[in-house]
Image (cartoon, rainbow, N blue to C red):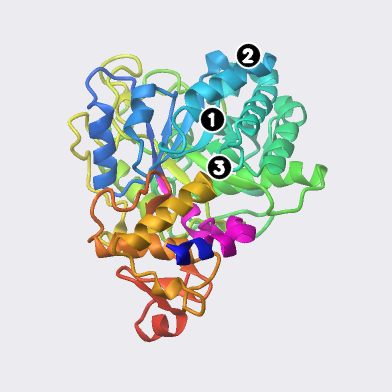
C-alpha cells in the first residue's frame, strides 16, 4: 500500500479540490414529511429512494430512527431544528450546541447530513419568532464550528414566497418592508460569510390558484407566447422562472446595499410541487402573497393527477441536466426539493383537503403518476469521494479499494489520472464499476457516494465503466462536463 500512501502525501495540500462541484449542482431531492399514520417504515423508504435514484432528502425534524436508516447510503439529508426550538437556540448557545451534537454529530458522517434548516417558513408560521431567526441560525452555525462540521454542513432557513412583495414583473421583486432591513439583510450577510444558501419555497400552484389571470400552461411550465417583463425585456414561459427571478432580484437589491458581488449568493428552492387531488377549501399556508381563501364550488380544480404529473416531470427533466437557468440568471444551477415524497393523510382539514395530496407516492409506495429521477441515464452511475470525512477515512478507503480489485495504475505518478482532484474518486469508481455497481460498493463507510451525472476532473472524464483521458473521451463520444 506504499503507493496509496504516496498519493495521500501528494494530496495533503490540495484536498479541498476534491469536492465534486458538478455533482453538487442541479440536483432534485424530495421533502420527506411524516404527518400520517400509514407510511412505510424509514428503512423501506430509504430503499425506495435508492431504487428510484433519489439522492437528496429534506426532513422536517431530526428523528433518530430516520437518520439511522439513512446511514451508509450516500443520500444527502437536510435536518431541521423545529420552530418550537428556535427561541431557545437563539437565546442560548449551549442549547444550540447540545442540539447539534445530539441531532447532527451523533449521525454524521455515516448519515450524510449536508444541511440544517433552522425553522420552516417562520415569517408565516411563527411571526412572533421573526427577530430571533438570524440569532438562532448564527448559534447553530457556531455549534457546527465547535464540532468541526461547518465546512460540510450548512445552515439556512426555508422561507415562504410571501416574504417577497411586488413580484410582478419579476424585476420588481423585493423583500417585504417589515423584514427586509431587520431580518433579511443580516441573514444574507450571514449566508455569504458562511458559504451557505438562501432557501425559498415557491409554489406556482398557489400563485395560479390565487390569480385567475394566470394561464394554466404558464403555471405548468409550457406557455408558448411568454410573459414580458417590461422593465428588463426578459420573456418568461414558466411561472416558476418568474418566481425564481423575483427571488434573485430581491436578493440582488439587498446584496447591493451590503456591497456583495452579484452572483456570490447561493439560492436553493426547498419546497416546489403540485398536488394531484383534493379541494382548496381553507386558508392556504403557502400562498403567493399572504393567506388566501378559495371557493372551488364553481368547479375550478387545479389539483389533478395530470397537472401534478406534468409539472413535476417538467421540474425533474429540467433540473437534472443542469438547465435551471432563468431568463435573468441563465447560468444559475440550483438544487430543488419536490414537495413531497408521500401523500400524508393527517394533514389539512377534512378528508378531501388538497394538503393530503402532494406526494409522488402513495403510502403503499406505488407512484401516484409516472416519473423518473434518472431520466435517459437511468442505468448510468458513478462513485466519487466524499472529502468531508477527512484524510484518515479517505486513506483507509483508498487502501481498501486499491487492495481489493480497483485498477489504480492510472493514478500512479505519471499515470493519466495522477491529479490531486481525481485520484481518490478514480479508485473508488474503479472498485464500484468492477463490482457491477452492486449495492454497498460505493460507500466505504461514508467516504464515497453515488452520483447520476457524468463527472470530469481535469483531463480525466469518468465513463460509466472506467476512467478515460480527455482525448479518448472525445473519440469515444463522451462529452466533458
Q: Is residue 210 magenta?
A: no
The tag on residue 344 is none
- Marks 2 and 3: CB-CB under 8 Å? no
Magenta span: predominant SS is: helix
Residue annotated with mark 1: 117
Q: Is residue 275 above or below residue 217?
A: above
Q: Secondary structure at mark 1?
A: strand
The percent coordinates of residue 356 (x first, y second) are 31, 24
The nearer-to-camera label among 2 and 3 is: 3
Residue at figure coordinates x 47%, y 43% from the top left: 214
Residue at figure coordinates x 65%, y 38% from the top left: 166
Segment colored magenta? 8-28
Local crowd size for mark 2, using a 10 Å CA cut-off: few (<14), some (14–19), many (≥20): some
Q: Is residue 19 magenta?
A: yes
The reply to whether residue 278 is visible in this rendering is no
Q: Earlier in the sequence, mark 2 or mark 1?
A: 2
Task: Classify residue 21 as left or right of residue 67.
Answer: right
Q: Secondary structure at mark 2?
A: helix
Residue annotated with mark 2: 87
Task: Classify residue 22 as left or right of residue 216.
Answer: right
Q: Is residue 237 above or below residue 284?
A: below
Task: Classify residue 79 as left or right of residue 372.
Answer: right
The percent coordinates of residue 333 (x first, y second) are 53, 55
Local crowd size for mark 3, using a 10 Å CA cut-off: few (<14), some (14–19), many (≥20): some
Amino acid at each position: 500500500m506504499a503507493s496509496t500512501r504516496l498519493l495521500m502525501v501528494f494530496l495533503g495540500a490540495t484536498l479541498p479540490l476534491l469536492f465534486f462541484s458538478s455533482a453538487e449542482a442541479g440536483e432534485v431531492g424530495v421533502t420527506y414529511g411524516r404527518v400520517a399514520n400509514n407510511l412505510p417504515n424509514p428503512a423501506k423508504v430509504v430503499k425506495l429512494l435508492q431504487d428510484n435514484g433519489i439522492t437528496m432528502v429534506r426532513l422536517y425534524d431530526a428523528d433518530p430512527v430516520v437518520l439511522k436508516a439513512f446511514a451508509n447510503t450516500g443520500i444527502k439529508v437536510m435536518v431541521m431544528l423545529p420552530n418550537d426550538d428556535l427561541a431557545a437556540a437563539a437565546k442560548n448557545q449551549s442549547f444550540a450546541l447540545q442540539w447539534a451534537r445530539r441531532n447532527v454529530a451523533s449521525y454524521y458522517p455515516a448519515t450524510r447530513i449536508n444541511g440544517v434548516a433552522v425553522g420552516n417558513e417562520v415569517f408565516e408560521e411563527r411571526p412572533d419568532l421573526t427577530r430571533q431567526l438570524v440569532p438562532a441560525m448564527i448559534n447553530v452555525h457556531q455549534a457546527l464550528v465547535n464540532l468541526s462540521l461547518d465546512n460540510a454542513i450548512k445552515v439556512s432557513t426555508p422561507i415562504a414566497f410571501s416574504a417577497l412583495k411586488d413580484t410582478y414583473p419579476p424585476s420588481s421583486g423585493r423583500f417585504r418592508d417589515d423584514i427586509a432591513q431587520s431580518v433579511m439583510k443580516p441573514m444574507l450577510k450571514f449566508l455569504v460569510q458562511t458559504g451557505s444558501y438562501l432557501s425559498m419555497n415557491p409554489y406556482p400552484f398557489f400563485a395560479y390558484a390565487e390569480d385567475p389571470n394566470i394561464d394554466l400552461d404558464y403555471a405548468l411550465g409550457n406557455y408558448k407566447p411568454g410573459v414580458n417583463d417590461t422593465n428588463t425585456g426578459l420573456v418568461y414561459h414558466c411561472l416558476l422562472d418568474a418566481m425564481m427571478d423575483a427571488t434573485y432580484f430581491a436578493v440582488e437589491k439587498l446584496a447591493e446595499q451590503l456591497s456583495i458581488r452579484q452572483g456570490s449568493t447561493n439560492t436553493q428552492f426547498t419546497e416546489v410541487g403540485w398536488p394531484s387531488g383534493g379541494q382548496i377549501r381553507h386558508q392556504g399556508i403557502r400562498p403567493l402573497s399572504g393567506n388566501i381563501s378559495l371557493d372551488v364550488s364553481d368547479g375550478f380544480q387545479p389539483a389533478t393527477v395530470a397537472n401534478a404529473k406534468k409539472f413535476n416531470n417538467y421540474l425533474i427533466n429540467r433540473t437534472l441536466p443542469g438547465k435551471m437557468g432563468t431568463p435573468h440568471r441563465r447560468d444559475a444551477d440550483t438544487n430543488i426539493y419536490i414537495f413531497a415524497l408521500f401523500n400524508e393523510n393527517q394533514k389539512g382539514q377534512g378528508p378531501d383537503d388538497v394538503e393530503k395530496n402532494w406526494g409522488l407516492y402513495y403510502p403503499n409506495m406505488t407512484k401516484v403518476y409516472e416519473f423518473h429521477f434518472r431520466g435517459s441515464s437511468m442505468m448510468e452511475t458513478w462513485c466519487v469521494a466524499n472529502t468531508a470525512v477527512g484524510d484518515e477515512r479517505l486513506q483507509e478507503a483508498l487502501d481498501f479499494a486499491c487492495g481489493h480489485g480497483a485498477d489504480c495504475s492510472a493514478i500512479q505518478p505519471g499515470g493519466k489520472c495522477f491529479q490531486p482532484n481525481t485520484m481518490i474518486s478514480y479508485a473508488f469508481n474503479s472498485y464500484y464499476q468492477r463490482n457491477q455497481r452492486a449495492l454497498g460498493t460505493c460507500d466505504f463507510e461514508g467516504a464515497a457516494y453515488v452520483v447520476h451525472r457524468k463527472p470530469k476532473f481535469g483531463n480525466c472524464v469518468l465513463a460509466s465503466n472506467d476512467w478515460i483521458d480527455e482525448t479518448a473521451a472525445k473519440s469515444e463520444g463522451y462529452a466533458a462536463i
